[in-house]
Image: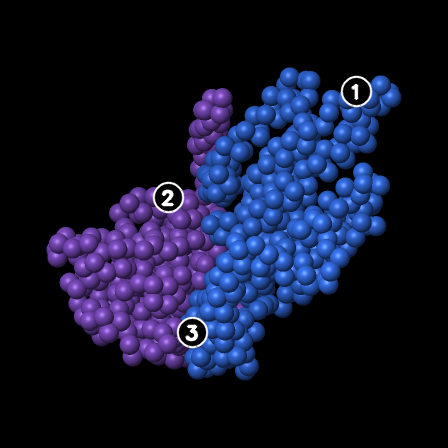
Chain colours: A purple, B blue
């Protein structure tokens, strides 16, 4: 009896789905919708240190959250007009597909499969997977992980790949213990349940520094040589929003490269070179092709700051995270970040 | 145990502890366990614990539990991501709901107007949380969090689910075939799915199928999913009570000339529900705890808020303390409710013993 009912209900659901497809007529860009709505719907998380987490006052802190603010500043001229929608890892892609959020900026690695489902715009952070172990156990290199228990968050594709490769290369097995969040996996490792803990490279040092009873007892190593490119993503088929997101991020990198900061942006807008003046609002036509105000880039820097400022505020030396910028440095300093030309 | 001895009042306790060899062995085993477990726990939780000042350094140097984290973060754990300046609103909502719960426990409060109080209180709570009128800033349900979410989900799911469940139970026993079929269909379908998958359907699948403008927000979808689930389960519990009643009750009521609804409301339901109070309590306590499942769909209930608080990189991560704190809240809610149900049961038994 229940089987028949299930069939009926599945039939109904499919019917509704088809009906939903057929009325997908010509649609306006989300940029227009965001302007009409007066706020940007962006992804929150369930708490990722340094990237996106609600603080005691309910304000979202972190690199990913600030990228949302930069885009809000570009479109709406006000970085505070962001509505953060808390999402867990499983919900983040459907949330973009269903229009629950406009921009996904929440530690999402760009992969082929994901890029077929939603549209990745640009890589905002390059990260790698780090294994934390206890020095006393003598696990000094990944090759010595055989037979060890590893605490990790479930659902991370690249971590799995890195561990699979290790197992294949060294012909051993590891015991993987999965958790619903990095926080739980982390606390479990530091409570002594596992021999090792795999996490994002950016957060590794800070976790040892703040969570470990004795930070000197732990050491880190990279799980493999894969890079995890974390990016921002939008729904597919929205070129206008793609433009805005890509070039807003470019403003952040460009400003860092040219030494333009929150503090000196006013001065630069008046006394900078011709290109700088043009980008910071001197040319009334500059934002027009994207449907933005001519001051859009100025607003981004003035209200949120350049890439380095966002980094320093959330991940840098003066934060508990103290992450190594490594691949996220400018190309001129040995990293992978470079501004695209404005011509 | 039943026959009270006329000896000293402590005698009963002594006899139940060491009255038989089996009891004596059990007593010794548990005494040893307590002796082994309690002192280290107390040392950790009380004597070596750090409370003040509520700053990260206190935790780092603490040998025992780090309660200063709870002191520093209680607002975040209790209210999640609700805007800080507006947190008097969820506080008021919690006070209102808990106050009304406590008020509802007194048998003298059980009048028809209590239902009215609850409806007003729920509308007031929703309005206060939501804002957007009388100068209150509007706070979308995405930003609701912590205890008020747990309370609202529980109270709404059970408050609507219980009457709906009664109607479903009556419908399933109805003589009208269409009504009977629909009710059976709903109950069996809902019970055949795990709550988690209902929540996933509500949070992830519905938005893919239903146009954006027609879709209620995620919080409301979770409320609806939980209410459906509660009503299906409560319906079956109530049906159990209905079946336990001798047929003569309904026939006698009919013979007296009572209408169907008079018969159900005045004769059948009061007896049927009294029979199933323990089962109802069970289901309702399970529902209180089920609300914590909404964390998988990204709502900031108590547990999510606690986890988000733990994500603060400034602090070492006292997760055990946070989970104990949350456990204490859930225990208070569930234990409080089971006491309330006990009273109900006593009262339901009352007249028949006279």
Which quadrant of the view contains residue B129?
A: bottom right
Residue A83 visible in the displayed image: no
Mark 1, residue position: B251
- The residue nearer to you, when weighing B304 against B184, is B184
Of residues A283 and B272, which is closer to you in this image? B272
Q: Residues within 10 Å of mark 3 (few under 14, many from 20)?
A: many
The residue located at (41%, 67%) in the rendering is: A49
Q: Nearer the viewer, residue B298 or A93?
A: B298
Distance from the alpha carbon under mark 3 to that under mark 1: 68 Å
Q: For residue A185, what is the image quadrant?
A: bottom left
Q: Do labels 1 and 2 share a chain?
A: no
Q: Mark 2 points at which residue?
A: A237
Q: In this view, does B283 lie above or below B71?
A: above
| Residue A307 picture location, percent across and down | 35, 70
Q: Position of residue A323 (x, y in %)?
A: 32, 73
- Would you identify the image quadrant in which residue A113 lies? top left
Residue at (57%, 38%) from the top-left corner? B229
> Marks 1 and 3: in contact by CB < 8 Å?
no
Q: Looking at the picture, do discs 3 and 1 lie on one chain? A: yes
Place of residue B314 in the rendered image (x, y in percent of width and height, measured from the top left): 44, 75
Q: In this view, does B203 lie to the left or right of A222?
A: right
Q: Which chain carries label 1?
A: B
- Residue B319 appears left or right of B233: left
Q: Mark 3 points at which residue?
A: B316
**Left or right, B352 with reference to B186:** right
Residue at 63 percent across and 65 percent down: it is: B87
Examine the rendered structure and indicate whether residue A161 appears above or below residue B88. above
Q: Quadrant of the C terminus of chain B?
A: top right
Mark 3 or mark 1, earlier in chain: 1
Q: How crowded is mark 1: few (under 14 residues within 10 Å), some or many (20 or more)?
A: few
């Amino acid at each position: 009896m229940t089987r028949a009912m299930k069939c009926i209900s599945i039939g109904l659901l499919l019917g509704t789905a088809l009906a939903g497809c057929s009325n997908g007529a010509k649609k306006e860009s989300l940029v227009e919708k965001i302007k009409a709505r007066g706020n940007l719907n962006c992804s929150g998380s369930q708490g990722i240190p340094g990237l996106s987490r609600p603080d005691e006052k309910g304000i979202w802190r972190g690199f990913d959250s600030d990228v949302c603010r930069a885009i809000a500043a570009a479109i709406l001229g006000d970085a505070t007009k962001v509505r953060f929608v808390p999402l867990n890892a499983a919900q983040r892609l459907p949330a973009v597909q269903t229009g629950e959020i406009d921009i996904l900026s929440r530690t999402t690695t760009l992969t082929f499969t994901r890029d077929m489902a939603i549209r990745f715009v640009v890589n905002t952070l390059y990260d790698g997977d780090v294994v934390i172990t206890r020095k006393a156990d003598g696990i000094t290199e990944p090759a010595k992980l055989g037979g060890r228990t590893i605490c990790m968050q479930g659902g991370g594709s690249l971590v799995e790949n890195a561990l699979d490769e290790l197992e294949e290369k060294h012909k051993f097995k590891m015991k993987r213990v999965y958790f619903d969040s990095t926080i739980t996996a982390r606390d479990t490792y530091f409570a002594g349940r596992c021999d090792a803990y795999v996490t994002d490279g950016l957060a590794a040092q800070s976790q040892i520094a703040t969570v470990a009873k004795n930070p000197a007892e732990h050491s880190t190593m990279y799980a493999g040589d894969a890079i995890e490119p974390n990016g921002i993503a939008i729904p597919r088929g929205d070129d206008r929003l793609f433009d805005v997101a890509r070039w807003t991020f470019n403003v952040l990198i460009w400003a860092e490269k040219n030494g333009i900061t929150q503090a000196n942006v006013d001065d630069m807008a008046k006394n900078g070179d011709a290109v700088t003046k043009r980008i910071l609002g001197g040319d009334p036509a500059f934002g027009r092709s994207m449907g933005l105000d001519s001051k859009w880039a100025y607003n981004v820097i003035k209200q949120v700051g350049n890439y380095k400022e966002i980094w320093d505020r959330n991940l840098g030396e003066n934060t508990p995270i103290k992450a190594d910028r490594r691949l996220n440095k400018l190309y001129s300093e040995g990293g992978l970040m470079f501004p695209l030309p404005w011509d | 145990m039943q026959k009270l001895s006329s000896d000293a009042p402590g005698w009963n306790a002594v006899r139940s502890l060491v009255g038989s060899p089996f009891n004596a062995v059990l007593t010794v085993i548990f005494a040893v366990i307590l002796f082994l477990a309690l002192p280290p726990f107390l040392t950790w939780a009380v004597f070596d614990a750090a409370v003040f000042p509520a700053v990260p350094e206190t935790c780092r140097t603490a040998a025992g539990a780090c309660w200063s984290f709870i002191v520093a973060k209680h607002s975040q754990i209790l209210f999640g991501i609700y805007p800080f300046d507006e947190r008097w609103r969820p506080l008021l909502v919690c006070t209102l709901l808990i106050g009304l719960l406590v008020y509802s426990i007194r048998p003298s409060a059980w009048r028809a107007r209590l239902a009215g109080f609850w409806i007003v209180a729920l509308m007031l709570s929703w309005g206060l949380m939501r804002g957007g009128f009388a100068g209150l800033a509007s706070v979308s349900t995405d930003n609701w969090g912590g205890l008020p979410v747990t309370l609202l989900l529980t109270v709404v799911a059970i408050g609507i689910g219980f009457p709906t469940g009664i109607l479903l139970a009556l419908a399933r026993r109805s003589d009208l075939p269409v009504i009977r079929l629909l009710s059976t269909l709903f109950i069996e379908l809902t019970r055949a799915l795990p709550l988690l998958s209902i929540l996933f359907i509500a949070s992830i699948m519905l938005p893919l199928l239903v146009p954006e403008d027609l879709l209620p927000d995620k919080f409301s979808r979770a409320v609806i999913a939980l209410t459906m689930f509660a009503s299906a389960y409560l319906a079956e519990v109530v049906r159990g009570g209905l079946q336990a009643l001798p047929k003569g009750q309904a026939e006698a009521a009919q013979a007296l000339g009572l209408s169907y609804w008079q018969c159900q409301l005045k004769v059948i339901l009061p007896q049927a529900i009294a029979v199933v109070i323990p089962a109802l309590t069970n289901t309702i306590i399970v529902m209180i705890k089920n609300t914590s499942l909404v964390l998988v769909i990204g709502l900031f209930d108590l547990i999510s808020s606690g986890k988000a608080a733990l994500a603060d990189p400034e602090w070492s991560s006292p997760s055990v303390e946070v989970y104990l704190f949350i456990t204490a809240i859930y225990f208070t809610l569930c234990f409080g409710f089971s006491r309330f149900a006990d009273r109900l049961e006593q009262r339901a038994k009352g007249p028949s013993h006279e």
